[in-house]
Amino acid sequence: MIKGFIFDMDGLMLDTEKLYIRFWCEAARFYGYPMEERHALSIRSMAAKYAIQKLKGYFGEDFDYYRVRQKRMELMNAFIERNGIDLKPGIVELLTYLRKQEYKIGVATATDLERTTKYLKRMELYDFFDEIVVAAMVENGKPAPDIYELAAEKLGLLPKECMALEDSPNGIYAAYHAGCKAVMVPDLDLPDSKTQEMLFACKDNLLQVLDMVKKMEE
């Protein structure tokens, strides 16, 4: 029986993944690294220590992850201040229903706590959640399972009692190996064959997830 739901943030609740991809590429190119969209896609939701090795594999050992990341943050923050953030369709309806049904609800995100809190409050989503867990709270971030294990623990549940909602393969790996029911709502790429094997379900949007939850309750 599902007793709780754990949400990724970027690309699932907030339409921000496209911004991460854009500004990772712009920041890397600013420092002379020829980053393309495919490179940035490969590190979506990935903890820094894993992303560093992957990017060095693409661009060489001199790739300065933290300097490029800082530039990416500056560019992205400036864009958001000017243009705001869009919600993903169905997120308010889904969260409202889950809260009404008294499910436990948590967040498990690679984004730092300060920005997670800022974004969720700005979009009036913060009060829906019982717990927020970020990568800095665990030894190993996504795609390792630690973040989902901790999120379930903080909700007072076993991972198998939680449905995890993710938009990226790295997030699905983390949720699945923690023992959660992994549901993918693709954002920038579709699940590959390896990811598909880990999925409880794959839905086009969060309104479809809401319909699925209601049918599960029948």
Image: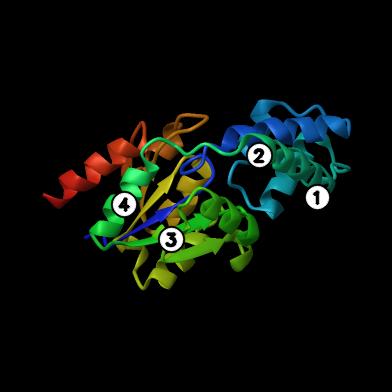
> Looking at the image, is mark 1 or mark 3 nearer the viewer?
3
Dividing the picture into quadrants, the one containing residue 61 is: top right
Q: CA distance from mark 2 to mark 4?
A: 25 Å
Mark 1 vs mark 4, CA separation in Å: 37 Å
Q: Earlier in the sequence, mark 1 or mark 3?
A: 1
Q: Amino acid at mark 2?
A: Ile
N-terminal label among 1 and 4: 1
* Res 96 label: 4
Local packing at callout 4 (Cα closer than 10 Å; few below 14, some 14-19, many 20+) is: some
**Residue 66: mark:** 1
Tag of residue 27: none
Q: Earlier in the sequence, mark 2 or mark 4?
A: 2
The residue carrying pointer 2 sits among few (fewer than 14), some (14 to 19) or many (20 or more) residues within 10 Å by Cα, namely few
Q: Residue at x 55, y 50 (%)?
A: 122
The secondary element bearing badge 4 is classed as: helix
Residue at the spot of label 2: 80
Q: Nearer the viewer, residue 185 or 143?
A: 185
Counting residues from the start of the chain, the first of labels 3 and 2 encountered is 2
Q: CA distance from mark 2 to mark 1?
A: 21 Å
Label 3 sits on residue: 127
At horizontal 84% and vertical 41% (from top left) the residue drawn is 63
- Determine if residue 155 is in view: yes
**Total numbered labels:** 4
